[in-house]
Image (spheres, grey):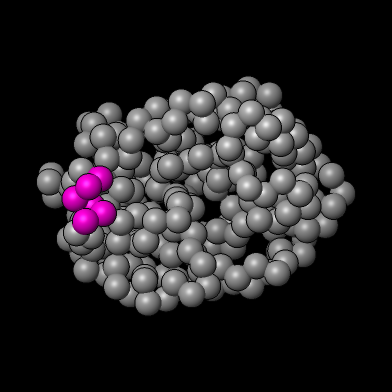
Amino acid sequence: MHKLLALAKEADLTITNEQARQFLVYRSLLLEWNEKMNLTGITDPEAINIKHFIDSLLVLHKDWIPQGAQVVDVGSGAGFPGLPLAIVREDLQLTYADSLKKRLGFLDEVIRKIDIKQNKTVHGRAEDLGRNKIYREQFSVAVARAVASMDVLLEYTLPFVKPGGCMIAWKGPNATEEITAAEAAAEKLGAAIGEVYKIEVLGMERLLVRVDKRKPTPARYPRRPAAIQKKPL
């Protein structure tokens, strides 16, 4: 627990002893479940602390996520970045969307064991959920740490975000051209690339990208996955 607290301090983040305890329970469950299903390729406890937990929290250097915001983590997988944010920002209402029910079973178990409120999981593909009126343009913030290219990621995530909200993407240090190339896609989806935050900490280099939703996304988006992949916006 003390190691995680020290890492957070080095990364200019603040977590409490209780939150550190919750992270350790999360990490223990992640390693346990990872033995029976593929949740992460990172299995060293210290690496999990840095590359999953601290990395997910770096966005808190910015005031991009409003108090009490409804946040959707699209393609949540093992819960990054959404679940670490939910642990540290108890005011947030988190929804975790993923296409694999087993992964959501893991998240449900973590949420129950660490006892965080206002968190729920939703099973479905992003392109289907983004067309569903229950979820379409219902969130102030969408977060995604997926490996998809920026233009593809925007089409999957922006339909969830209400005008006036934003989408936040975690990208690698060499993604500058990819981000610039996605400006046209953002515009077609009713948004614009906002701030790009570059950070180097604990041996990690990150670009965090805020995309501001300015108007409703046209009804034809998101398209089917084959169309998105074949002809990105």
User: What quarter of the picture does the C terminus occupy?
Assistant: bottom left
Residue 85: percent from the left, percent from the top? Answer: 58, 45
The residue most toward the right is 2
Residue at image x 45%, y 52%? Answer: 146
Residue 229: say if magenta: yes
Task: Examine the rendering and report whether any part of residue 156 can be seen.
Answer: yes
Residue 42: percent from the left, percent from the top? Answer: 67, 49
Residue at image x 27%, y 29%? Answer: 134
Q: Does 231 sit left or right of 80 as displayed?
A: left
Residue at image x 52%, y 73%? Answer: 173
Span colored in magenta: 225-230
In terms of depth relative to the viewer, which is nearer, 59 or 149?
149
Q: Does 216 sit left or right of 38 as displayed?
A: left
Task: Examine the rendering and report whether any part of residue 26 can be seen.
Answer: no
Residue at image x 43%, y 42%? Answer: 75
- From the viewer's perspective, is residue 28 above or below residue 144? above
The rendered magenta stretch, by its main secondary structure, is classed as: helix
